[in-house]
Structures are given as structure tokens and as C-alpha cells.
Image (cartoon, coloured by chain):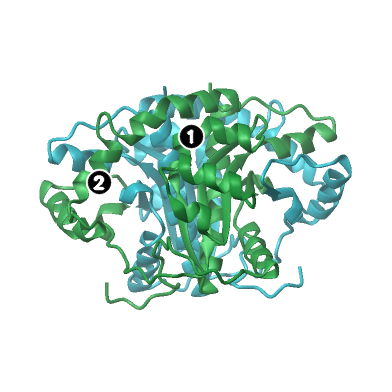
Chain colours: A cyan, B green
Amino acid sequence: MSAERILPPHRSVRVFRAEPLPYETFERILAEAQRAPTDATAQMYSFIRISSPDLRSRIAAISGDQTHVAEATEFLVVCADVRRLERVLESRGHRPGAYPAVGLHFAIVDATLAAQRLIDAAEALGLGTVCIGGILNGLEELVDSLALPRGVLPLFGVCLGWPGEEPVERPRLALSAVLHQDAYREQEPGEIDADVTRMAAITRSRDWVSILARYFASGGTMEQRESGLRRVLERQGFAW
Amino acid sequence: MSAERILPPHRSVRVFRAEPLPYETFERILAEAQRAPTDATAQMYSFIRISSPDLRSRIAAISGDQTHVAEATEFLVVCADVRRLERVLESRGHRPGAYPAVGLHFAIVDATLAAQRLIDAAEALGLGTVCIGGILNGLEELVDSLALPRGVLPLFGVCLGWPGEEPVERPRLALSAVLHQDAYREQEPGEIDADVTRMAAITRSRDWVSILARYFASGGTMEQRESGLRRVLERQGFAW
């Protein structure tokens, strides 16, 4: 990867210095997040800033004992949110439509666009970040703890703070794996082999496929999260 | 919003100059997109670059006659993709798990993180962008046209090119609407009124709620997209 970089490098930072993040800086970062594109002007997301140490500890535990969730200077739960826009409609006498799948689709997209712009803004200021997908291990408890109404779904967490470590950049797939032209192109077996080699450095064991298998193979973490997510989708109004 | 900005301003650009985008620059932007955070190292996304003028015209038509889809220098269809990682697992003798809801969740997040980093990188170089949610109007045709296998779902499009217009920045909700602390806080009626006033400038009619209603009220665009999206979710393996 010799091409000149455009943005500050992204590496997941899991160790943070005790140095405070001024609230004005935090607000500037959030203002950048808000400037992300949004479908149909609706801004279908909410950020829940977790300041309570007890809540932080619970979420750290839920997420698989990720101590950086408790220790980061700031921790946000990024949520898809169609509730707020429905209240705007109701306040003007409109009846919201019934579109659980489309609502889920666009609200996840909107929330994630805002979250990535938040991450890019934070990193531009020298802050470190890491996304926490592990909140899905205890999604129902999280919905209860954060008093999330129907129409709001937690997606992932984001830790923010001044980096207390300098992680190396992790590898990524070959561009040819993720970029297609005019139609989907399946990888040839040799390309898969090359990607497996290329990705080895992403884990200390140098066995990328074992990491993937732990999450995505039959019996893995993703399957274990499935029933909890389905229950929460039903409860929050995103099931059909 | 007097606070000092961190990133170049985002405005949706729908008019592009004929000036070419060198392929090396396009690749640098894609390399930045690839550096976005990714859940469990899996990179669950694909970008389909649409270079065929016929395909561009069809997608422009599907999306509600959005001529910028045909005219932009580059146009990408951003897809959630669990197919590629399942082939990696299978290549090493692992059986992929069954997690349609969790797969949909994380693949939309992964794809959108990468897409927003792509947008931030493009804008840092002075390019203009606009996201196209309207591809959902003809999702089944798109899945056919792009030969998307099971496990791959189109999310939205992104137009890229050198700006041929200088749109003003559009308003956003008050920060207090999207930022909560430790629990979800519903807006008071007065806050909704203030947001409706604040958002007026997002549309020429100065009637934001009518725009929202056109999409999100009963009988609106989102409801019309629902059955098509459900069929595609079923067909692509993301239904449960």
C-alpha cells in the first residue's frame, strides 16, 4: 500500500490516556457526525453517551469483558432511531407508515454514516477510537438499561479518547475482493488463498480463518447472538 | 453552528463537471474506504462500480429519474456482503453458521462504515458526493442486473465526481435531539416545534414535515418499498 494517504490512519485503539476530552471538542465531533448524509432528511439515529460508571461496567461485561468500554474517555451507543421522526409526523397530524424492513435498512445506514463521520472527525483531531460490536451479546439488557422505546435499536458502541497505545495498522483484503465492475465477481480459489495469507497479520496467531470461524462458522458467536437480536427486533418494531 | 469545523463540509452534490477522475485517485479513495473499522475482521461489504452507460441509465430511472446517477464521474452500488467470508470459511472446511438477522445487522454496518470513510476521503480531495437511497425502488431488478449472489444485498448508491455546483449546507436537528445521556430522552413538544423550524431550510418549500410525510407517513415511499425489500431479503438469505 504505497499510495499516498488522504485521512489519518485508522487503527482500533483500546488503551486510552487519562487526559480529559473537553466537552467543546466532544460537541465539535458530534456536530461533524450530524453533517453526514442522511436519507430523506430524516436523521434516523441517536447516540447514547454513557457517563454512568455502573452502566459502563455493565456494558463492558456484556460485550465480553472489554475493559476499554469502561475506561475510555467517552463511550457512545450508536442506535438506529425511527421513533423521533415518527413523533415529528404525529405532532403534525400524520400517521407513520408501516415499513419495518425499510426502516431497519435506512436507520442502520443513517446511524452508521453518522458514526463513521464521527470517527473520522475524532481521528482528525488525534483521538483514538474502537467500535464495539459485542453489545449484541446482551442486547435485551441494553434496551432495558437505556430505556430505549420502540423504534430504537442499538447497533454498536464507540470508545473515544486520547490514545495510550500506538497499534500497528491491520491488513485488509485485496481491493479486487471488494471492488466489482458492473456485476458481482466471485473470487477464484487462488485469490481466496492470497487473501488468507494477506490477512494473517490481523491476529497474533496469524490464523485469520480461525478468527472468522469463531464468529461466523456454525456454532459461533454470530449464531449465538441471533435469537437475542431477533427478540429485540420484534420488541422494537423492526420485525416483519 | 459557530464551532470550528474539523472535516470539509458535506453537502450533497448532484451536478458534476466532465473533468475525469484519475483511476489512481479513485483507488486511493477506495483504499481509504477499506481502512474503515470492520466487525470481527470480516469486511462484510462489496462495492459494485457501475461503468456501463446502459446500467447507469437503468439505475438512474429506477431511483426516480435521478439524472446525476447517469452523469456522475463514478457511481458505486454499496452492498452488504456475507457471501465472500462464507466462501473463505468453506475453502478451509468450515460450515458457515445461520444468522440472517445478525448477518444483516453487521453487514449493513460494515458496508456503511466503509462507504462513509470513502465519502470523507473523496471530500477531503475536493470531490462531491451524493448518496442514492432510491435504488430501493427497484431492488429486485438491481439484484438481477448486477448478478448478486445470495448473501449480497444492495444498500444505497454513491455518486462521485468534481462538483459542478456549490450547494449550501443544509440544516440538521439540534444536537440535543440526537444525543442522549445514559438513557433515551424523548423530545418535548416545544423541542419538536423548534426542530421543525430549524429544518425548514432543508427544502425549497420550507415545509420539512411534508418531505418527511412523503417518505415516512402511511402510504408514503418507504411503505411502497417494503414488499420489494422483503422479497429481496428472503431471496438473498437475510430473512428469518
Residue B72 position in % (x across, y down): 52, 59
Disc 1 residue type (three-letter): Gly
Residue A197 position in % (x across, y down): 85, 51
Most foreground residue, B231 or A88: B231
Q: Tell which tag, 2 or 1, sits nearer the viewer.
A: 1
A209 lies above or below B128: above
Quadrant (top left, top right, bottom left, bottom right) of the N terminus of chain B? bottom left
Disc 2 residue type (three-letter): Ile
Contact (Cβ within 8 Å) of mark 2 with mark 1: no
- In screen coordinates, is A142 left or right of B192? right
The chain carrying label 1 is B
Co-location on one chain, circles 2 and 1: yes
Residue A139 position in % (x across, y down): 46, 35
Q: Residues within 10 Å of mark 1 (few under 14, many from 20)?
A: some
Is disc 1 placed on a helix, strand or loop? helix
**Which residue is labeled 1 in the image?**
B138
- The residue shown at (12%, 36%) is A93
- The residue shown at (46%, 74%) is A19
Decide which of tag 2 and tag 1 comes sooner along the chain: 1
Labelled disc at residue B211: 2
Most foreground residue, B218 or A198: B218
Residue B127 position in % (x across, y down): 51, 69
The chain carrying label 2 is B
